[in-house]
Image (cartoon, helix red, strand yellow):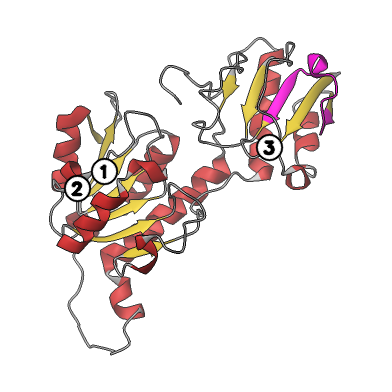
Amino acid sequence: MIRIYFAAPTWSEYEPWLPAALTAAGIRAEILLEAPDPALIDYIVYAPSGPLADFRPFTRAKAVLSLWAGVEKIVSNQSLTQPLCRMVDPGLSESMVEYVTGHVLRHHLGMDRHIVNPGRIWDPTPPPLARQRPVAMLGLGELGLACARALQALNFPVQGWSRSAKAIDGLETFHGRDGLREVLSAAQIVVTLLPRTPETENILNAESLAWLPAGAVVINPGRGPLIDDGALLAALDAGRVGHATLDVFRTEPLPQDHPFQAHPGVTITPHVAADTRAPTASTVIAENIRRSEAGEPLLYLVDRARGY
């Protein structure tokens, strides 16, 4: 019998799904919501919002399986010596694609001009075609690539940027500082889906925002610290950035006195672009436990040195 410690505050969401997923994977398991004897635990299902901070007593644990896609709140924990797997959830990917595609189309079509239009100004000027609206996708992991493919399917010309070189069929990719400048210089819409690392923090700053064509749109459903808030506000005021749609922030909920709250060029959404979905995430957790028990490589293993 495998013992699983569910160290997250969301058991009610997973109770209908995780036991069934484990059974379907051929795993006989006991799921514990407390761990009075940590040395008996085989696997930890973890969320940073849960009760667990010290992993040292869990000497038998074979893996820590995070329910979150981001691992910046745990990866530097010195007590964590067990393998750590981040969550790559098909449901999360689908919802991120829907959010990004929806907001790209919103800005591409100029929908605010017609929806938020108290004067009912009659302006029959049509938007350009999608193939005339370049998009920069910063981040080419599971989420970034899924969003890039969806936008390509709508005929948007997409260029991708990542920290290291990647060769992806059908997608023009760049890396490094020069590559970042090249993709931003051509982009009318920028989507940020990078992990938070020391190298990506403030990747959109005063210098890089100045590379954008005047009036470009920024959409950030990735991580709040990817953007220098002050630099973005200055770029909005100067017209360098035409609008910013932001789903993530350095402090959440976003304080009411933050300048983003009142800025007419900023759309705020309350971290709803994508969330882990219990039905699909349960299948991912069960599959990783099955793989571990079978001696197969774990899925979505975090590279501690890279931070994701």
Q: Nearer the viewer, residue 114 or 24?
A: 114
Q: Is residue 157 left or right of residue 201?
A: left
Query: Does the CB distance between marks 3 and 1 fall below 8 Å?
Result: no
Q: Residue at x 65, y 27 (%)?
A: 53
Quarter-of-image position of residue 158: top left
Q: Residue at x 35, y 58 (%)?
A: 245
Query: Does the CB distance between marks 1 and 2 fall below 8 Å?
Result: yes
Q: Nearer the viewer, residue 107 or 61?
A: 61
Give the mark nearest the N terminus, 1 or 2. 1
Marks 1 and 2, Cα distance to the nearest angstrom? 6 Å
The x and y percentages for residue 70 are 50, 35
The x and y percentages for residue 169 are 29, 31
- Element at badge 1? loop
Residue underneath mark 2: 209
Image: magenta residue range: 31-45
Q: Is residue 234 left or right of residue 52?
A: left
Query: What amino acid type should be assigned to the residue bearing mark 2?
Result: Leu
The image quadrant where one finds the N terminus is: top right
Q: Residue at x 38, y 48 (%)?
A: 150
Give the mark nearest the N terminus, 3 or 1. 3
Depicted 188 relative to depicted 176: above or below: below
Can the viewer see residue 216 in this picture? no
Residue underneath mark 1: 204
Marker count (numbered): 3
Query: What amino acid type should be assigned to the residue bearing mark 1?
Result: Leu
Mark identifier at residue 50 = 3
- Element at badge 2? helix
Can the viewer see residue 284 in this picture? yes
Query: What amino acid type should be assigned to the residue bearing mark 3?
Result: Gly
The x and y percentages for residue 278 are 68, 44
Q: Residue at x 31, y 28 (%)?
A: 199
Marks 2 and 3, Cα distance to the nearest angstrom? 37 Å
